[in-house]
Amino acid sequence: MKAAVYTRYGPPDVVQVTDVEKPVPKDNEVLIKVRAASLNPLDWHFMRGTPYAVRIIAGLRKPKFPGLGVDVAGYVEALGGKVSQFKLGDEVFGSCKGAFAEYVCASESVLVMKPANVTFEQAASVPVAAYTALQGLRDKGHIQAGQKVLVNGAAGGVGTFAVQIAKSFGAEVTGVSSTRNLDMVRSIGADRVIDYTQEDFTKSAQRYDLFFDCVGNHSLLASRSVLNPKGIYVGAGGTTDNWMIRPLLGAISSLVLSLFGSQKLLMVLAKPSKQDLNFMREHMESGKITPVIDRLYNLNEVPEAIRYLEIGHARGKVIITLENN
């Protein structure tokens, strides 16, 4: 079978699409015939081996696991001996290792059924981005109906889910994006939009109960200034460096600032959750949430897809499609 693999750290050119052995599912796994997979920033971080902290997981000198991609959707091709939740031919989506391949194995604990009204490409766009948005808003931000929520980076992969998830909780949502994405952000439910090329929201008199930040392009003090007295800031993205100095300083600053006053400044690190996948499945099935897809690439174009994602201007999700698989 074909798979996108890398054997050393570096730019997208280190990723090669080649023939590899077809995997065999363990007792608690299913073999998935992949129809679609989506890219996340963690894919190019693992590809480049930066920040260097990822090498603790991926391998110090070279990658321990050659595959990239964790978000997947496809058909159940084979079952492990102890699998009880799925049958052959089921259409599923969830998480795995090495999703940029024709076939992958995934634990049944991180898979759910794909709704019939959702495409494989839409389903594959969900896991990492939706985990981040849902767990950040609900678990860290304690979002409530009627609250004023600000989403910075509302047009990105996580941001497009955050806007729609916040609306599903009954919040009043303001989305921050560039000029070209304002109409799209409105179309997915934002009550108000801010063009960051024309307006600095940190200098506005408007205050929010919850600030969900996918970009991290303002200081924590500036971000804190847009919150109500008991508001919550949740950081879900931002710039980094090879040694993680800026993120670590940010985390320390958040902790220190949270000790003084009633506002909270928190960070979210998403975790796989079958319960959260089911939340997304139900909300997609009902039409409350519709994934936003920017571009489709085929398996042979994985390096180009990663290169595009690294630029940082993707509108929604970037997808690897194996439509004829």
Image (cartoon, grey):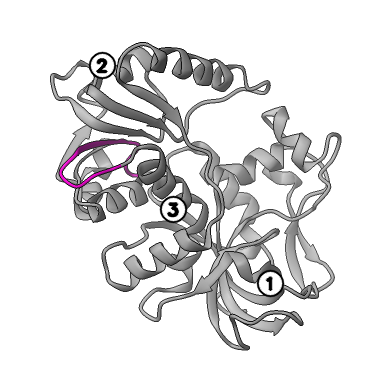
Residue 246 quadrant: top right
Q: Judge depth for marks 1 and 3 and give the one in front.
A: 3
Neighbours of disc 2 within 10 Å: few (<14), some (14-19), many (20+): some
Any part of residue 219 in sight: no
Mark 2: secondary structure: loop
Label whose residue precedes the other's in the sequence (3 or 2): 3
Q: Are marks 1 and 2 in contact (CB under 8 Å)?
A: no
Q: Which quarter of the rendered picture does the C terminus lie within?
A: bottom right
User: What stretch of residues is rendered in magenta?
Assistant: 143-157
Which residue lies at the image location 52% right of the left edge and 72% below the top edge? 112
- In the rendering, at what x and y percent does residue 34 appear? 62, 73
Check disc 3 and report the residue beneath it: 130
Check disc 1 and report the residue beneath it: 102
Which residue lies at the image location 32% right of the left edge and 20% below the top edge? 223
Disc ID at residue 231: none
- In the rendering, at what x and y percent does residue 206 appear? 14, 24
Check disc 2 and report the residue beneath it: 225
Amino acid under label 2?
Ser
Neighbours of disc 3 within 10 Å: few (<14), some (14-19), many (20+): many
**For residue 160, side relative to residue 111 (left or right):** left
Mark 3: secondary structure: helix
Amino acid under label 1?
Glu
Amino acid under label 3?
Ala
Label whose residue precedes the other's in the sequence (1 or 2): 1
Per the picture, the main secondary structure of the magenta-coloured stretch is: loop
